[in-house]
Image (cartoon, rainbow, N blue to C red):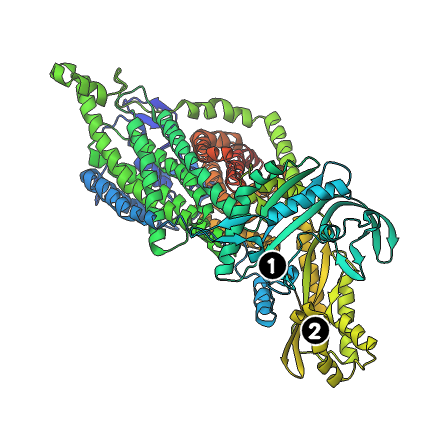
């Protein structure tokens, strides 16, 4: 966003010479929110000297001198350099602030843009057509958007260098699995294909014969599903299911036991482990809503179970089997509703989910935002037309406003096309970018139009364009640089999706700036020629024949009386801020109320910061009406107790036959079992079973040869354990693993704590250990998101502080800008918790954006205050609000309009973008218009 203030129309009074002299001189400001069209705040170089202002502004503000803009190359008034004394005419006004100023950056930029404006005014068609041709060329890059490629959710929304990915590589290199003979889901290093059904009984418990019969009927119907391929062959469930000893893994162990024995005593079931015929059957995570009774050894009697999980695991290996598994899952999703209806289930409620559901629903959700883009486009056009409408048919800029929105769309086409040409992946989250670009691009358009309307119609087009560019282009340049800088700091994040969003948006902002000073400026110059023709027609209405009447009405719409072309164009909103809002805000009662309001705001924000949930809930990748939403709701309600089984891996060679080595290992394992997030009695460790096995055979477990030679026979009796031991040579075990059962980690906070505590225990153990589960790939985002957010915010804030020092050379102003950025970030982060927004990769993007916009909102207000020559602090505040109140307000409104349509999106990923951008705009505008102006009066 851009804002400009040097051409603000001050209060004027006629002099004896008939010219108007400024009563109070406006001050040059740094970057900030964009200047709204029609405001009496004109564009100015950010670092111009007050002497330069005196020389430049007097003829412009009076509108009566008739002096035209200088062509490029004309010698300008000399700028006051560092350490040079101020002219005597200004000594009484600024003697209390005698310090070093510099325009070494602004002056060359202003001269360069003055020359560019002259060229645009001289050759508008070239500057109009070349960007259009460039857009057409770069826009062809959109053909590279792949509609068939799947977006890898793990790649895009998990940390790039997460520890879990390194742990997974270790597991894959040292351990194997067998989906066809000895499938074990918690031994897998990656996610497997599966279909899951949660069954909830309409009664208090489903441990009844009639209900289990209905569940069994559902189970048989699922396993009876088959897919008919194009060649007529069928894919049966029995062909794609994961197997154990040649049979499909049962969907639920208790249901399978009941199916084998319908007379099973349901009143004697123990939990979390049930023993049948001497064989332990683990039930943890398979039954939900349980009520337990008396303790029976390490277990308890299962009194009631409200819900049951049916899990259908499929083969996941690459190749034809993997393809068939996916085809069966898609068929399952397509047929489940019909199957449920045909079964006429009366005693149970069912919800379903598959391993493909997140991906398929995420892809479906991304298409729903496209119609919203068209709606945002229409709203922005309407807002632009309303903002630029004037009853004066000569100065009316409705057509220019419409083209300004079109040029913003050109920037989206060019930026996205270029990135696709280069090969930057187009991820779903990037679809948020055009909504933001629309709002920001319109802001730049407003400042250009405002600068144009402050020129004199009697001047030539080249002179008017030269004047506009010399005044407003510098401000647009500086604020564009700060916004692009804020986005490119996001490239440092560990999340691919955030990196790609920031690359796309930062690049598109550059094209938006480039097209504003070329394509849009050229169109504005062409419209200036319309002004000249329209003005001539209105002044001499009788020179045209009747054939030109319709053309006249078209070009001079809205047709009306001609206003004085030398009259100052002061917007009513600026008068409101000067005459009403400013005096009201600076009253004692208002200041007291504002301080209380800020204290309440700060307390609420800090409180909210400590209650923000971390990490992206994967269900939020789907739309609100998706079938996966009730599935996760039921899962949270009835299955919150048990989490995944976690591998505890011995990563180096260990003498397991050594008693002392085993004691060290057992000590570490006991520490894991003592952790609050681990169940004490559900650990599974091959070494414990093997030691018991050797002791039962009365063999010496401490003898190396006995230990090594007997292990093969042990694997025959316990085949699953052979996948837990990596024997690299006949006499060496290079690595092995145990499994611990996690519990009580339903919330993201507990997942994070569990992950950090288990890794800490592994690190402290004397034996080199590692912990891993496939879910850790996603859990790592909980540990990385805060670190990434803080780092990006600090880097971006530091960059903004340096920019403010360079471009607004007043230390007090820079401190206030930094304070405002910090305050807005705290407020946005805190109120995220109240609006049910998690701190994830999506909201992290917006917090980075927050820095740039906060800088824009507050830099101008604070610098206008510290540079004001008014005698009292209240008058300084009123002058700053008079100059900047309406531009700040208009900038916030235009950006909110650009993203407001996302509030109607059915997906969290888009709705979150609106929520945080709304908070950024509201809090940024409140700081710029209320908090900062009041606080400045206290110092």
- Category of crowding for the residue at label 1, using alpha-carbon neighbours closer than 10 angstroms: few (below 14), some (14–19), many (at least 20): many
Q: For the residues marked 1 and 2, what is the alpha-carbon distance in whole angstroms?
A: 21 Å
Can residue 635 be seen here? The reply is: no
Q: Is residue 159 above or below residue 663?
A: above
* Residue 836 placement, left or right of 434: right
Residue at image position (73%, 49%) is 641
* Residue 636 placement, left or right of 317: right
| Mark number displayed over residue 628 | none
Whichever of callouts 1 and 2 sits on the residue coming sooner in the sequence is 1
- Category of crowding for the residue at label 2, using alpha-carbon neighbours closer than 10 angstroms: few (below 14), some (14–19), many (at least 20): some
Residue at image position (31%, 19%) is 391
Give percent across and percent down for residue 433: 43, 43
907 and 325: which is toward the camera = 325
* Residue 162 placement, left or right of 489: right
Quarter of the figure with residue 720: bottom right
Q: Dividing the image into 4 quarters, which one contains the N terminus? A: top left
Give percent across and percent down for residue 443: 39, 36
Give percent across and percent down for residue 318: 50, 62
Residue tagged 1:
242
Give percent across and percent down for residue 411: 33, 43
Q: Dividing the image into 4 quarters, which one contains the C terminus? A: top right
Residue tagged 2:
715
């Amino acid at each position: 966003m851009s804002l400009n203030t040097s051409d603000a129309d001050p209060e004027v009074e006629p002099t004896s010479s008939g010219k108007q002299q400024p009563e109070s001189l406006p001050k040059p400001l740094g970057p900030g929110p964009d200047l709204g069209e029609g405001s009496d705040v004109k564009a100015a170089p950010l670092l111009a000297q007050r002497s330069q202002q005196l020389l430049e502004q007097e003829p412009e503000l009076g509108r009566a001198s008739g002096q035209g803009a200088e062509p490029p190359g004309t010698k300008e008034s000399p700028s006051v350099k560092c350490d040079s004394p101020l002219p005597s005419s200004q000594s009484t006004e600024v003697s209390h602030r005698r310090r070093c100023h510099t325009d070494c950056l602004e002056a060359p930029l202003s001269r360069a843009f003055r020359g560019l404006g002259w060229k645009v005014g001289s050759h508008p068609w070239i500057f109009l057509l070349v960007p259009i041709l460039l857009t057409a060329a770069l826009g062809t890059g959109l053909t590279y958007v792949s509609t068939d490629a799947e977006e890898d959710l793990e790649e895009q929304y998990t940390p790039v260098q997460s520890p879990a990915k390194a742990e997974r590589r270790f597991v894959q290199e040292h351990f194997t699995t067998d989906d066809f003979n000895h499938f074990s889901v918690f031994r897998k290093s990656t996610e497997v294909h599966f279909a899951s059904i949660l069954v909830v009984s309409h009664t208090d418990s489903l441990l009844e014969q009639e209900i289990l019969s209905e569940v069994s009927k559902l189970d048989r119907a699922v396993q009876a599903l088959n897919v008919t391929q194009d060649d007529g062959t069928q894919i049966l469930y029995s062909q794609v299911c994961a197997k154990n000893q040649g049979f499909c893994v049962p969907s639920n162990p208790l249901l399978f036991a009941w199916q084998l024995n319908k007379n099973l005593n349901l009143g004697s079931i123990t939990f979390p482990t049930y023993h049948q015929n001497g064989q332990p059957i683990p039930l943890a995570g398979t039954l939900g809503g349980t009520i337990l009774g008396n303790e029976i050894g390490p277990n308890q009697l299962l009194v009631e179970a409200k819900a049951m999980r049916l899990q259908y695991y499929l083969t996941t290996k690459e190749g034809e089997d993997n393809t068939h598994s996916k085809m069966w899952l898609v068929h399952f999703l397509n047929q489940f509703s019909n199957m449920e209806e045909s079964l006429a289930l009366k005693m149970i409620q069912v919800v379903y989910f598959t391993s493909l559901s997140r991906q398929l629903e995420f892809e479906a959700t991304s298409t729903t935002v496209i119609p919203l883009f068209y709606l945002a486009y229409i709203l922005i056009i309407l807002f632009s037309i309303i903002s630029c409408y004037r009853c004066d048919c000569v100065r009316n800029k409705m057509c220019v406003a419409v083209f300004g929105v079109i040029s913003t769309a050109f920037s989206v086409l060019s930026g996205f096309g270029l990135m696709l040409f280069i090969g930057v992946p187009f991820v779903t989250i990037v679809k948020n970018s055009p909504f933001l670009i629309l709002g920001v691009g319109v802001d730049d358009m407003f400042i250009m139009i405002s600068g144009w309307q402050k020129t004199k119609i009697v001047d030539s087009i080249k002179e008017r364009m030269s004047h506009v560019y010399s005044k407003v282009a510098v401000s647009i340049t500086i604020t564009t640089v700060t916004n692009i800088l804020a986005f490119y700091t996001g490239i440092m994040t560990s999340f691919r999706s955030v990196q790609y969003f920031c690359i796309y948006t930062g690049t598109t902002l550059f094209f938006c700036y480039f097209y504003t000073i070329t394509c849009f400026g050229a169109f504005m110059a062409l419209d200036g020629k319309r002004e000249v023709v329209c003005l001539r027609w209105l002044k001499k209405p009788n020179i045209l024949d009747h054939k030109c009447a319709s053309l006249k009405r078209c070009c001079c719409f809205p047709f009306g009386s001609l206003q004085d072309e030398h009259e100052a164009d002061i917007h009513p909103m600026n008068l409101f801020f000067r005459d009403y809002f400013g005096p009201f805000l600076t009253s004692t009662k208002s200041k007291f109320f504002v301080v209380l309001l800020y204290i309440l705001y700060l307390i609420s924000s800090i409180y909210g910061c400590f209650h923000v949930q971390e990490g992206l809930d994967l269900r939020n990748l789907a739309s609100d009406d998706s079938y996966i939403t009730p599935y996760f709701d039921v899962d949270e309600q009835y299955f919150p107790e048990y989490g995944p089984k976690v591998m505890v891996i011995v990563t180096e060679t260990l003498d397991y036959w050594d008693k002392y080595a085993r004691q060290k290992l057992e000590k570490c394992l006991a520490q894991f079992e003592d952790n609050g997030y681990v169940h004490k009695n559900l650990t599974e460790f091959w070494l414990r079973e093997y030691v018991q096995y050797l002791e039962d055979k009365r063999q010496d477990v401490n003898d190396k040869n006995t230990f090594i030679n007997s292990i093969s026979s042990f694997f025959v009796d316990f085949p699953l354990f052979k996948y837990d031991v990596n024997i690299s040579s006949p006499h060496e075990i290079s690595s092995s693993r145990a499994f611990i059962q996690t519990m009580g980690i339903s919330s993201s906070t507990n997942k994070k704590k569990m992950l950090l505590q288990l890794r800490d225990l592994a690190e402290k153990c004397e034996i080199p250990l590692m912990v891993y589960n496939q879910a850790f790939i996603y859990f790592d985002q909980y540990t990385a998101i805060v670190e990434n957010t803080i780092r990006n915010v600090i880097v971006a804030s530091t960059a903004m502080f340096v920019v403010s020092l360079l471009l607004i050379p007043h230390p007090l102003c820079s401190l206030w800008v930094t304070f405002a950025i910090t305050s807005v970030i705290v407020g946005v982060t805190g109120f995220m918790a109240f609006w049910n927004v998690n701190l994830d990769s999506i909201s992290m993007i917006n917090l980075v954006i927050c820095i740039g916009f906060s800088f824009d909102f507050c830099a101008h207000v604070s610098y206008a205050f510290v540079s004001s020559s008014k005698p009292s602090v209240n008058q300084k505040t009123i002058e700053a609000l008079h100059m900047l109140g309406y531009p700040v307000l208009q900038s916030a409104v235009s950006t909110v309009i650009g993203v407001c349509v996302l509030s109607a999106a059915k997906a969290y990923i888009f709705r979150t973008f609106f929520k945080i951008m709304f908070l950024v705009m509201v809090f940024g505008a409140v700081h710029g218009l209320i908090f900062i102006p009041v606080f400045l009066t206290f110092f």
